[in-house]
Image (spheres, helix red, strand yellow):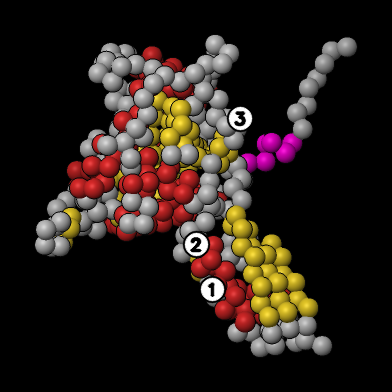
């Protein structure tokens, strides 16, 4: 009879802290089954976030730890992932066919928010999720250019729009409906109504995540998003520069006030590496994103370099994650995507879909 116990296996599994989650898989409730037969051990792990890029690494780490338990002769680990819907603001209900909405925001313009949003969406897709992106910047839509999409969206029923597709992303933007050089001379109410229509009247097809690229600031659009759009979590983009951090703090506090969880901060343009000599320089200062994360008790999801290729590739309609899938910058975007989705997976789940709808009829 084997001396291997479930407790011993759990103890071994707890020694591995999964980098994206920042905690062990037992504590994160990802271990779904432990079977012990003599010295043979089978463990089933289901992650709550897309992780195609690291599943083999996690399997290897867990297998090694189980194999080291006295009495174990064979260790088998099955790691998979499944994205579920997470809870949103109390007064709202999730949108059909969209499990989770992630808002990407910044306090001020010029910090690379749209570039981060599109690469985050593409990175989530590269990790295996079904992803869409909504360009909520009505005055300055940039996603059509960044995704290399031209043309108009179809409407099969005359009431709703079919999302445009590029690089396996479903996309919608006011930029698809107007000429690129036409200015949107609209007042606030028209803008917020347009945002709601773009979101609700698009036939999103079974999305795990919808990334919303918000305009900078904390104005009408952000307020509409907070009050009328069921958001599961937000990501704040900033640069290390003091003036950007000042505005990023306002964005973070706004989400906290409207009960949208801030999943973390992305520090953009954190370091410049000279393309000629390799010299590294902190042009916009250093450590700002980290200190802001520590101050507000949120995670620094990642730091991205000031790199000419990121700008060139998004301008040409082929963002870095698809243009250079094996580059270090893409690796950072995918790490940010996994961390964002992992932090979201630890949030409360949405159980509304599991309850039957009660309809009272007068007979």
Residue 286 rendering spot, x and y as whole percentages: 20, 57
Direction from residue 299 to residue 241 in the image, left or right: left
- Residue at 42% x, 44% y is 122
Instruction: Name the residue that disc number 2 marks.
Output: 54
- Mark closer to the observer (1, 3): 1
Instruction: Name the residue that disc number 1 marks.
Output: 61
Label 3 to label 2, Cα distance in Å? 30 Å
First-in-chain label (1 vs 3): 1
The residue at the far left in this view is: 277
Are the residues at dot 1 and dot 3 in contact (C-beta closer than 8 Å)?
A: no
- Residue at 64% x, 69% y is 77
Question: Label 3's element?
Answer: loop
362 or 322: nearer the eye? 322
Instruction: Name the residue that disc number 3 marks.
Output: 96
Direction from residue 286 to residue 91 in the image, left or right: right
On screen, 174 above or below 49?
above
């Amino acid at each position: 009879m084997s001396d291997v116990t479930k407790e011993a296996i759990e103890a071994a599994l707890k020694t591995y802290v999964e980098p994206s989650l920042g905690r062990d898989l037992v504590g994160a409730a990802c271990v779904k089954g432990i079977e012990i037969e003599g010295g043979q051990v089978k463990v089933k792990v289901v992650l709550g976030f897309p992780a195609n890029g690291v599943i083999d690494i996690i399997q290897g780490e867990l297998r090694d730890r189980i194999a080291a338990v006295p009495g174990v002769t064979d260790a088998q680990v099955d790691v998979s992932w499944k994205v579920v819907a997470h809870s949103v603001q109390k007064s709202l209900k999730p949108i059909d066919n969209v499990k989770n909405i992630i808002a990407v925001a910044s306090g001020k313009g010029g910090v690379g928010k749209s570039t981060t949003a599109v690469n985050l969406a593409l990175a989530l897709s590269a990790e295996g999720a079904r992803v869409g992106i909504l360009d909520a910047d009505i005055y300055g839509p940039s996603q059509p250019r960044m995704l290399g999409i031209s043309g108009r969206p179809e409407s099969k029923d005359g009431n709703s729009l079919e999302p445009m597709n590029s690089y396996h992303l479903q996309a919608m933007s006011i930029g698809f409906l107007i000429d690129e050089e036409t200015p949107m001379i609209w007042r606030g109410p028209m803008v917020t109504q347009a945002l709601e229509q773009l979101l609700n009247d698009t036939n999103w097809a079974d999305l795990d995540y919808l990334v919303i690229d918000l305009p900078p600031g904390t104005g009408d659009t952000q307020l509409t998003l907070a009050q009328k759009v069921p958001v599961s979590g937000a990501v704040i983009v900033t640069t290390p520069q003091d003036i950007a951090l000042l505005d990023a703090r306002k964005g973070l506090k706004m989400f906290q006030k409207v009960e949208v969880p801030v999943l973390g901060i992305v520090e953009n343009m954190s370091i410049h590496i000279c393309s000629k000599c390799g010299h590294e320089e902190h042009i916009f200062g250093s450590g700002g994103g980290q200190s802001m994360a520590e101050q507000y008790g949120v995670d620094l999801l990642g730091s991205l370099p000031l790199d000419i290729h990121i700008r060139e590739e998004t301008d040409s309609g082929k963002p870095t994650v698809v243009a250079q899938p094996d580059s270090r910058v893409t690796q950072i975007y995918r790490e940010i995507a996994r961390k964002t989705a992992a932090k979201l997976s630890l949030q409360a789940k949405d159980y509304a879909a599991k309850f039957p709808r009660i309809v009272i009829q007068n007979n």
